[in-house]
């Protein structure tokens, strides 16, 4: 069964920007299933738009600012 965006319900989402990169923390529920947390990174491209990239490693500053957001997201799960 292919992914259907209309079945993906966003329960929580917060974005933290760090200059030319940003990290999004979200809680989603697909087709009435279990709520799950999703963490993604986007970087600014040459045209000023955001482009998805692998989250990979995080700096200490990023982690310190992301963990409290993750804890708020857990409360929505």
Image (cartoon, rainbow, N blue to C red):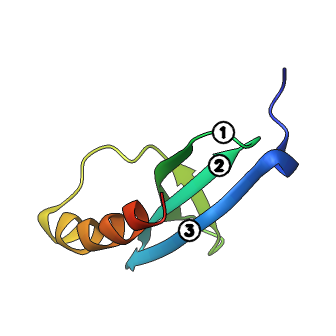
The residue beneath circle 3 is: 12
* Residue at horizontal 49 percent and vertical 50 percent from the top: 38
What is the number of callouts on the image? 3
Above/below status of 10 relative to 16: above
* Residue at horizontal 66 percent and vertical 71 percent from the top: 47
- Please say if the residues under marks 3 and 1 sit with CB atoms less than 8 Å apart: no
The residue beneath circle 1 is: 33
Chain-order first, disc 2 or disc 3: 3
**Residue 59 image-quadrant placement:** bottom left
How far apart, in angstroms, are the residues tagged by discs 3 and 1?
A: 15 Å
Q: Which of 45 and 17 is in front in this view?
A: 17
- Please say if the residues under marks 2 and 1 sit with CB atoms less than 8 Å apart: yes
How far apart, in angstroms, are the residues tagged by discs 2 and 1?
A: 6 Å
> Measured from the top left, where is residue 31 in percent x and y?
77, 41
> Measured from the top left, where is residue 72 in percent x and y?
37, 72
Above/below status of 41 relative to 76: above
Q: Which mark is residue 29?
A: 2
Q: Which of 65 and 9 is in front in this view?
A: 9
> Measured from the top left, where is residue 39 in percent x and y?
44, 53
């Amino acid at each position: 069964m292919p992914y259907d965006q209309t079945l993906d319900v966003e329960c929580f989402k917060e974005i933290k920007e760090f200059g030319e990169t940003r990290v999004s923390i979200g809680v989603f529920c697909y087709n009435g299933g279990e709520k799950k947390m999703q963490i993604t990174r986007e970087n600014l491209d040459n045209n000023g738009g955001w482009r998805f990239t692998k989250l990979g490693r995080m700096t200490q500053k990023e982690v310190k600012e992301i963990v409290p957001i993750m804890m708020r997201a857990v409360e929505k799960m």
